[in-house]
Amino acid sequence: MSTVLWARLRPSVPLKSKSDRGGNARDCAAVATWRVLAPVPRFSKARLAALACGAVLAGCESAPPAVHQQDLDTWVGAPVSALDTHPLFGTLPMVRVFPESGVEVRDYVNKRYVAGCLPPASAGSKTFTMNPGTYKAFRTCSENMSGCDNVFTIKNGKVMQFSPEGQCKTSEIVRPSGR
């Protein structure tokens, strides 16, 4: 179904209402003053939403990457104390895993409703130490949540790798202080 866009041909004939476009015989002269310019399609709300989502997704394809390699590289070789005192990561829940001897994985979780995937902890605790199996179950639980897992691999007291996973953005805010 489409709505019709009307244009008036002769402005000299006054129109009184919508009925002037064919409402009764008295207004036949007025009807002749209108013609169809072009049909305007009418869309359902669902179709409009689908079109809007398509436009947004098309815009995302050309957007610059949200994770910048230079922000990740600043963490390589940084001491663990930089993570412990970082103003952003210090506010997020941290999951610690020790998959191999001498290696530590820290996941600073920035996701809404992630508490439902974490084990019960003491009041006010933001640090959760897990074995690799429990960590895998935690990641499976939280993988469909929107947000970011800021995963750091640490060995010998130094950061070896920073790999954000999920819907992440990096900037100067995530860099260690003084780098």
Image (cartoon, grey):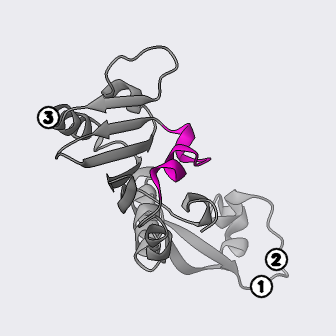
Distance between mark 2 and mark 3 Cα atoms: 82 Å
- Mark 1 in CB contact with mark 2 (< 8 angstroms): yes
Residue at the spot of label 2: 13
Q: Position of residue 94 (x, y in %)?
A: 42, 37
Q: Quadrant of the C terminus?
A: bottom right
| Residue 33 seen in this snapshot | no
**Which residue appears at 29% of the width and 46% of the height?**
104
Q: Nearer the viewer, residue 95 or 148?
A: 95
Mark earlier in primary sequence (3, 1):
1
**Which residue appears at 82% of the width and 81% of the height?**
11
Callout 3 amino acid: Gly
Describe the element under mark 2 as helix, strand or loop: loop
- Which of the 4 image quadrants contains residue 121? top left
Mark earlier in primary sequence (2, 3):
2
Distance between mark 1 and mark 2 Cα atoms: 6 Å
Distance between mark 3 and mark 1 Cα atoms: 79 Å
| Residue 36 seen in this snapshot | yes
- Structural crowding at the residue carrying mark 3, measured as other residues with C-alpha within 10 Å and reported as few (<14), some (14–19) or many (≥20): few
- Which of the 4 image quadrants contains residue 20? bottom right
Q: Which mark is residue 133?
A: 3
Residue at the spot of label 1: 10
Which residues are the magenta region? 79-92
State yes or no: residue 87 in magenta: yes
Name the outermost residue toward the bottom: 9
